Image (tube, coloured by chain):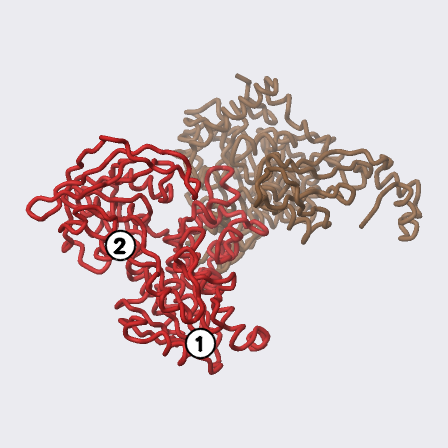
Amino acid sequence: MAEHYKPAKYKAWEMTLEERFQEVYPPFSEREARLEADRCLYCYDAPCMVACPTSIDIPTFIRKISTGNVKGSAKTILESNLMGATCARVCPVDVLCEGDCVLGADHKPIAIGRLQRYATDYASSRNIKFFKKGQPNGKRVAIIGAGPAGLSCAGELAKAGFDVTVFEKKEWGGGLSTYGIVVFREPVEVSLAEVKMIEDLGVTFKNGVTIGQDIKMDDLVKDFDAVFIGIGLGQVPMMAITGEHTEGVVDGLEFVEYTKVNKLDNIDHGNRICVIGAGNTAIDCATIARRLGAERVTMIYRRSEAEMPAYHFEYEFALKEGVSFMFLTQPVEVLSKDGKVDGLKCVRMDLGTPDASGRRSPVAVPDSEFVVPCDMVIKAIGQIKPEHFLGMLKPYGIEPVKGYIKVDQDNRTAHPKIFAGGDCVRSHGEASTVMAVQDGKIAARSITAALVGTAAALAKK
Amino acid sequence: MADLSINFAGIKSPNPFWLASAPPSNSAYQVQKAFEQGWGGAVWKTIGAPVLNVCNRYGTIDYKGSKIIGLNNVELISDRPLELNLREMKETKRNFPNHAVIASIMVESNKHTWQEIIKRTEDTGCDGFELNFGCPHGMSERGMGSAMGQVPEYTCMVTEWVMEVATRPVIVKLTPNVTDIVHPARAAIKGRASALSLINTVNSIMGVDLDTFEISPNVGGKGGHGGYAGPAVKPIALHLLSAIGADSECQKANLPISGMGGIETWRDAVEFMLLGATSVQVCTAVMHWGFRIVEDMIEGMSNWMDDKGFTSCDQFIGKSLPRISSFGDFDLGFQSVARIDHDKCIQCNLCYIACNDAAHQCIDLKELKITGDVKERLWPVVREEDCVGCDLCSKVCPVDDCISMVEIDTGRPHITWNQLTQSKPEVLEWDKMEEYRKSANIHIH
């Protein structure tokens, strides 16, 4: 058989562990990319572009793939979104660009995400650099958190001539792109390459530094002309049920992170796993567990299918991966045997009247307790809000809103030197990578306007 | 099922589908295989003067994922020995007596040589001849092929030589590489040809390689013009076919025409026949997909004939020819405007941008509140009073039947340019033209 011909393997049990953790969608070949790009109508004032939170000029980047100008295509993407390679993989395209594609009328929108991945991979695999550090303007900006919001803000500021330092408490930059997105959606290398791209713009990274612990917030505000906070959210909150600290109960985000930074054959996992929650991280945990080889993975969710917060395509993906779902089920106790998880005691739920969010509140059914036998419980019921950080911001007059950092539409806080963006300000709307990237851009614009003035910044271009 | 058989200047064929004289009709093996699969006839790859071929011989144009919308070649006439070709032609005719076997001939411009080869070829039992006056490359540089077809006097002279000795029908194949194909067509008629065929391939350079700077097709680093064929040339072929059909001298002679140039499907074939072709010839499509395409060609044409109530090909050959007219005879009073069906519109706005940038700026993007969605986008809407009826918008619209051109009556006089300039020659001055427009309710914005 010809060397270039690698037949796709569809059956998990025929794949090696490594193959199971390759990206779910293989990269487009050149021919596939051209054919798909050729299908694009090149709409005028295209709805996909309007649907993109970062306003990527999608028809233009697709046309450039079609003409063989893939380098130009990548530039078009990255000019609007420095995290284009990540967004190509993790964006919920069904509800954004692809969801608004006019070809949806024929039930086959353009695969915009995969084309974006093709173009950005083309540039990064050839180490093509599109941007350079701007003429220094003498202003220093501190960025707290090297996630998508922080990186986007840092990159845009560096392009505009700011001296930017990013403080990151983890060992690597990239935030959830590096640590929180399951590897078969986005390999670590993709995210780290984006960090490298920002670093190449002259941005200084101080990793392993926690603000409020290693460096005081006061010092940052004193030493820098502006501070951008892009700290994201915290770990998975406590469920406050008996047995929660038993060996074998793990934090969902930590579980995902573990699979991203460790060798796959080194990962301890149970064989019969309960995943609590039905958001996208819960789905990630469940599908990872299946691909690692867990025999039975059950997702436990207290509301019904219709209320589950995960994207529908993620739900379908989990079903295809052999994950089973127990809806209207609430865990009440982790059972243990010899100090280890042995089962999850649950109660049946019914949906009552709609709550403040409009969703019907689940109500426990009396005497409906039952036990799901399992040897591992993964909690993925959301992330805690940045409460500890809000405490540090209080002296600056920055108030919380629903537990998030309060900003205006230009991502300015109540303090003139402090700006914020990303998941930590998402008091309403859905948290997503692409929204965080846009927040970084908006904040960079506001910081530029505040420190050098919009007119001066424009004149320099 | 309709009767697809034809009688082409006395050459009988079970259907109008013939292999054109080209690589697919190079040998007995190929032609007999084609006949087995349903082809009605074949014009054998041209025999004649000895030649030597080169590599590479083909250049192609692909478009948006479709391979070979155009194919050019620098291959010459048959490079197999003359004797072998004649022997195989004879065998083929013996095995398939009811199919049309036509010999394509090209030799140097010498009466004796032409008459000798015609006589020798007649012995094979072939049904007729096609004189190759069209090949634009290789042979033309040696004074053959299109070098003969481009000079009407030569066309006439050689046709006469052939007609002196031929006892079977003689088809003269015309080159499109002329200013007006009517002249060589009339020359062939004058030389007493039994029929015409067209078009041969179009002069072309297929492309240049951006990495190596080489020409396509690339013959050891060099390239030159070759003969262009395939779907891309069909409109040119249809025009040249209809030009002959509309010419009064050609009409008087009423010779059957074998049409070719980009025919790929039964639909293409029907179009050629509606414009006057009695048989059709195919090459590029067979080079792309093989002989098997003929099954659908036969079935598709037959189904179409059944749907239209035609029982034989004669009933529709040339049916659209009377509609071929010239600009001076078009009705200046016929007016149409574009109408967009917003139930079908997908809001790609290609009509808007085409009209705005490249036509007459008469489509606006407007709020219509059709869907009730708060995020509803603007819709393209035609300002009919400003629409000039150019039809560009419906041509760029990707949705079937979404934009239609609707005939409207604006009270303009139904008069042709020729009638107008005859009755009011003063309109050839701009100020008088303005006056006429005003009176005729014609507004240019």
Classify mark 2: residues with Cα within 10 Å, few (<14), some (14-19) or many (20+).
many
Q: Is residue A298 left or right of residue B249?
A: left
Closer to viewer: mark 1 or mark 2? 2
Residue position for label 2? A253
Amino acid marked by disc 2: Leu
B286 vs A43: above or below: above
Instruction: Tell me which chain the residue with mark 2 is part of.
Output: A
> From mark 1 to mark 2, how far is it between C-alphas?
34 Å
Which residue is the site of mark 1? A133
One can see residue B213 in this view: no
Viewer-nearest residue: B119 or B304: B304
Question: Which quarter of the picture shows residue A223?
Answer: bottom left
Label 1 element class: loop
Question: What is the x, y in percent for residue A6?
Answer: 26, 48
- Residue lying farthest left? A338
Q: x%, y% of residue B401?
A: 61, 34
Asked if residue A383 can be seen in this view, the reply is: yes
Q: Chain of mark 1?
A: A
Position of A381 with respect to B16 (left or right) is left
Q: Colour of chain A?
A: red
Q: Residues within 10 Å of mark 1 (few under 14, many from 20)?
A: many
What amino acid type is highlighted by mark number 1?
Answer: Lys
Task: Say which residue appears at 64% left-offset and 29% top-offset.
Answer: B274
Q: Colour of chain B?
A: brown
Image coords of residue A60 (percent x, y): 52, 56
Is residue A53 found left or right of B384 in the rendered image?
A: left
The residue shown at (25%, 37%) is A324
In percent of width and height, residue A312 lies at: 37, 41
User: In the rendered view, would you say A95 is above or below A56?
Assistant: above
